[in-house]
Amino acid sequence: MRSEGVRDRQQVRVADTDAFLDRCLPDRFGVVDNIVQELGRRGLYHVSEERWDGFPDVDATAWSAERDQLCAAFTRLANFIIAEADNLLLGGLCSHSRWVDYHSVAGTAARTGAGSNTMRDSRPDCALVLSELHSADEKAWEKGTDQDQQDRRFVLGLSIGARHLTVWLQDRSGILGTETPIAYHENPEQLVQILVALVAQPEHALGSDPTMKVYRGLSDPPIPVYQLAGDAAESYMTSVATTRWVVEMGDGRSYLTLDAFDEEHPSNDGLITWAAMNYADREKNPEERKIYLLKQLWRASDSSAIFELDVDASDSDYVAKTAYHERVKLDGSEDTTASSIRRGLNCVRPPSGLFRTTKVIGVPIYNEPPVQAADDHSMDCVRTRTVLSTFGLPLTYFADRVELVRTVLDGVKGDRDMFARNILSADICPDNILIRALENGAPTGCLVNVDYALREASSLRAATESDHVANIDTPTEDFEETVDLIENTMKVLSKRGAIPNRPDFERTVLAHALRAVEDGDSKSRQPCTDVIPTVSYLTATASYIHRSSNTSPGARYTLQTLRWNVDVPPSRPTLDSELLKQQPWSRPTSIPYVSPELSGAQPLVFACRNSGRYRHIGHPVYWDAVHNVEAFFWSLLYICITRDGPGSHRRRELTCNMDEIRDPAEKAAVQSLRHITNCFFDGDAHTLLVNKRNLHRAAGTDSDDDFVKHVLPHVAPYFEPFKDTLRNLFDVLMLAYAFRAFEYRDIHSRAIAILEDLLNRLHLDHREDSSRARAYVLKKRGEYMHGLRHSV
């Protein structure tokens, strides 16, 4: 459960200490008082002194000198409490668990049976890690709790000092801690309650997923991880990708996972994507086994934006088919962070200074508190699973340039088809643009993860339709006068050379431009103010057409030339305060591919040259099709910059050791490539947002070639034919954002035309059909599919 994701969600909260213990770590068996009395009789707790035996009695300033003593004393005491609880309960509930001192390997997460032999007897949720949590240790812990433990829903941990401790719970909503530090010397019952609960509660109450069990072959039934013996665990769980799970679904079916896909840019939604087969098919002939995609993630449970697509909700050939979707249930109730994990606790923002400690047992705690959201209450997330009958590989596994472009093109078509039904895919990224096998002439690309989508509110649709432009066939006298003024202004500017290429616009073009830009609001403005944005729009459009199509000087522009002779949906205005309340909004999770307008707490305009009342910088804006098309653009650009040919591996320049590069010019080029990659894809959310906003704001200004100067040169040589396409996509997106007119409302068609042009040009070059790289990728792909079917 990655710390960056928690910071990004701004969800660090605390709950009343007594309520936290009673609900999350209760004394279910009523043995705490008996154990405390026995500890007193054994001399492990000195009642008169209110002090645990062997614990250091120092203040925080002497912590580094005494932490070894504390770690040893805590481990000894915790294991005695486990043994005593096991004796009292007489059920062997605790005999398989013990605390181990991992202080010497600080930051390493313990996994039952995974790693070194010294870890075999420890439970993953009771592992003791005592260290100052530096970044390397934090990454090691996260790998253990998130990546290696795919069956883990949350993790519990302690931060402990010489006199106090705090209990922490980390889940997909963030981090939750006890509000008041526990004085564990003065309150021995609370310490005993915590340690007993950590070993005596049901596994799902300690973070495990009872619906996921380890597959052990045809003859042995699957069992939970914690029931595996040490050697068996090492045998069945050699790596994250090869660990096979039997996942029990709510409809009674079970699926056997065969492989786990790596995410290009992991997010905090806990997304796991497996290649899987129906568990009942394991005894079938391998060639008869159908391979599915099984996706699991956590999403906001109370967002009206999110809905689950029904099995037959999408009839597009370019959208993956959903075989089954569910909100996971445990004990008959939905598995949500608010109810099944946090047990209905009132979670509020912590007091200042609570996160200053670096003395940690368990989950990572930050030295500096993340910036908090305005809302005091934490986000409630629900766990969902989706089975897709459409199987394939992520976009990064392309075999050649034609397949790459065709797959992206088909993905855009799928998004267009969904948008026509008032549905917006909310997570477009290379992982969710699928390359599927060519079957009976079906497209090679499609969108997946479409169960994570937005449905447009009907009330908002009605509100935006009321603002639709008036019929141009019945213009008013004032409208005609304004068109005359625009026509004269364009002629003057053209003669002065202020408009590149001196375009000649039909009068109907001027009228359409005026209507599109003013967005049905001409009555509230004077004609002179209407002229400015319309002339700017016409000028920018002419410049774009001239650059992308190489039109001749003095070219005649008609509705057909500009592709304005199409029916377009009503303009969706940026939102006023009332409309904003109706907008479905759930921030996308694949941050590197998200428009900067969607990267903040709410969608905001960052580039617009229309001076209308809906069009000023910093105003809330509706999540629209243009934002999804921009996600396709960033996905394609990401591959063109980080790959240098077919396959899924990154360019050598991004992975090599800089110290081994001797040539200064080569080193500078590699550093520049890594800098651009970090600015737009690999950096933190703030870095990506700032750089993308700067590109948006520069579009159409004197520095509008920033993209051409600083980004395009880093496209790999293999993708040289893509440069014009990437620039055309970028330019049409910026034109759409700047004026929110025809290009904005018809953005899918514009992007499809640009990609089809590239595809046609690539088809003229047949050299790639016989390339060794393409043949190798296709061979490996065939072996992979064969291996999946024969892996059981």
Image (cartoon, rainbow, N blue to C red):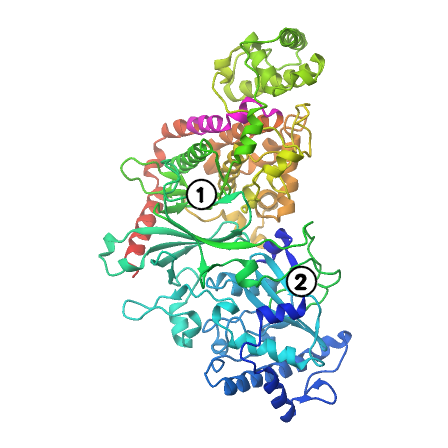
- Mark nearer the viewer, 1 or 2: 2
Q: Position of residue 54 (x, y in %)?
A: 68, 87
Where is 507 relative to 183, above or below? above
Q: Position of residue 561 (x, y in %)?
A: 49, 14
Which type of secondary structure does the marked residue at label 1 adopt? loop
Q: Residues within 10 Å of mark 2 (few under 14, many from 20)?
A: many
Which disc, if any, is residue 50? none
Return the residue nearer the eye: 574 or 66. Answer: 574
Which type of secondary structure does the marked residue at label 2 adopt? strand
Q: Residues within 10 Å of mark 1 (few under 14, many from 20)?
A: many
Q: Label 1: which residue?
A: 450
Q: Residue at x 64, y 45 (%)?
A: 687
Region of the chain picked out in magenta, as a range = 739-757
Where is 677 relative to 619, above or below? below
Where is 172 relative to 753, above or below? below
Q: Position of residue 109 (x, y in %)?
A: 54, 69
- Taking the magenta stretch, the answer to whether it contains residue 204 is no
Q: Residue at x 52, y 65 (%)?
A: 144
Q: Position of residue 716 (x, y in %)?
A: 50, 39
User: Which of the 4 image quarters holds residue 438?
Assistant: top left
Mark 1 → mark 2, Cα distance in angstroms: 34 Å
| Number of disc labels | 2
Q: Amino acid at mark 1?
A: Val
Which disc, if any, is residue 14? 2
Q: Main SS type for the magenta part?
A: helix
Return the residue nearer the eye: 726 or 358. Answer: 358
Q: Amino acid at mark 2?
A: Val
Q: Quadrant of the N terminus?
A: bottom right
Task: Confirm or deny contact between disc 1 and disc 2 (CB under 8 A).
Answer: no
Q: Is residue 472 visible?
A: yes
Return the residue nearer the eye: 149 or 332. Answer: 332
